[in-house]
Amino acid sequence: MISYKEKIAEILAPQIEGLEKDEIMAMVETPADSKMGDYAFPCFKLAKILRKAPPLIAKSIAEGIAENAVFEKVESVNAYVNMFVSKADLAKAVVSEAVSKGADYGRSDIGAGRKVIVEYSSPNIAKPFHIGHIRSTVIGNSIYKLYDFLGYDVVRINHLGDYGTQFGKMICAYRRWGNKEDVIREPIKTLLSYYTKFHEEAEKDPSLEDEARAIFTKLEHGEPEETQLWQWFRDESLKEFNRVYDMLGITFDSYNGESFYSDRMPRFVNELREKGIMEEDNGANIVRLDEYNLPPALITKSDGSTLYITRDIAAAVYRKETYDFYKNIYVVASQQNLHFQQWIQIVEMLGYDWARSCVHIPFGLVSLEDGVMSTREGRVVFLEDVLNRAVEQTRQIIKEKNVNTENIEQTAKDVGIGAVIFNELSNYRIKDYVFSWDKVLNFEGETGPYVQYTHARACSILRNAGEDVVRKAHEEFDARYITGESAHSLIKLIYELPDVILEASEKYEPSIVTRHIVDIAQSFNKFYHDEHILVDNEDEKIAKVALVLAARNAIRNGLGLLGMNAPKKM
Ligand code: ARG
């Protein structure tokens, strides 16, 4: 499709000495008020280069572009050149493309031939899968969808927290006070209670700590009994996690977590030693990072056991060797910023030139209205409960409001879970937020249900238009019928969607897509309000139906990139 910004830069480049095409392109603005044109070019910056007053520059540039066929009207207003695209041409180009490409509208192949790893969710075994985990899970899933849509070959990894001394404690507690049936019935809550009990008892009897350490050592050496118990805890926890992933429609290509790297560690410990990067410190091994203004990193403890960071170094190298990634993306909380700075630095010090292809994508904290979440104090909101409650509430609304749907259960799921996902992806990921039931379950305003409802409304118009008209709209339409003010605004937003998707991927920021589809939905509703769509005039009807199709595709594709379904009726 035509890029107007590029076109403007092409026309202007010969007129403005000293500015490259790319620089000009970056200067082009899209005024919020369409009275100021579809595109505007500010001339302030040029005053220095051209040694003329900005308004004079604007005037002469406007005259230079005026002769061009791309714009219907070009005028200079003070220091700005305002450009108005031909509404019918734009409508023709955008709507044809959005209609014909359908589910592929916005897709591209810029990533073809490049492998990207997205690591997300990565919960800890035998710990609650709580509302805090929704962030990595949902943001990561959307980043995966964005990269996939742009043609990258994406590998989704769930780097499970399935290793560490806590498993020694858990096995110890299970053997002393545990019960198989309880674990099977409710794995995570039960295992967690063992873990808590262990800490209580260990305060009274410190020898328990030694016992747990000995058990962990056995586990590290692959002793069958300990390994079997650990494997069982892992399987049971994963079953619980998978229930949530199923609800969210999320899958992974690999669940290789920390334990997977447990026996790959010696190689890196040796490498760090041989390259003189690591030094001994009271029996432990550390890497000093003063030069990079970072605190030292602990690589092995004095008892020889490795740490979280050691496993991340091993995992990165393994991934490079296995997948030869172009980028290795980690969607992990901002509390771990330091951890990522440290290990990526160490990988660089080891001489791996791809170290900076590992990118940490941080996000802010979720807290509860009564404070920060605390597993120990029982102040947690389980993700599964949130999803179930959202579905339940939606089911009720559907029944009360007599919502038009053939499948109440499916719609309740699509909308209820969609509301949670959309809420999660509405704000910049780096922002902290307070979890509130009211907000998640609010179906008014700029929410997921509102956008889904708009999509269903478009589908309903298409049903009413009838198959024949819809088919004709796919073939040919007269764009002059969709040049009214609200149609034009809607078309511009649909036109921007592919760029928005690209920007969201570059910034690892799904919320850019979220906002844009809210804008499309609002603009669509304004068009629906302002204009009569299924009019008697057949040509006019076909053109308007084509625009409805285009808007429906844009909204549906946008929702899909967030990881949401778009019900046809609601
Ligand atoms: N399991 C960790 C946690 O819950 C997150 C893992 C992040 N990924 C990584 N490669 N370190 O805090």
Image: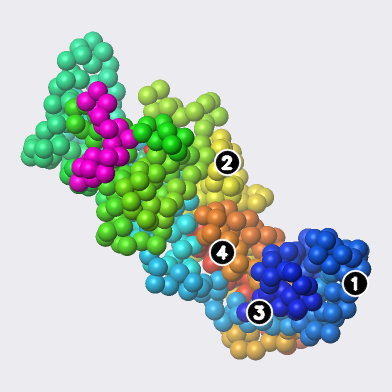
Q: Sequence order check: which comes first, mark 4 or mark 3? A: 3
Q: Sequence order check: which comes first, mark 3 or mark 2? A: 3
Residue at the location (18% across, 38% down)? 230
One can see residue 385 in this view? no
Residue that mark 4 sits on = 501
Residue at the location (67% across, 50% down)? 445
Q: Provide residue 159's location: percent of width, then percent of height.
A: 32, 47
Kind of residue sitting beneath label 3: Ile
Q: Name the front one of labels 4 and 3.
A: 3
- Horizontal arrangement in the rendering, residue 112 relative to residue 17 (left or right): left
Kind of residue sitting beneath label 4: Ile
Q: Sequence order check: which comes first, mark 1 or mark 2? A: 1
| C-alpha distance separating marks 3 and 1 | 25 Å
Is 564 one of the magenta-colored residues?
no
Q: Provide residue 171's location: percent of width, then percent of height.
A: 17, 30
One can see residue 273 in this view? yes
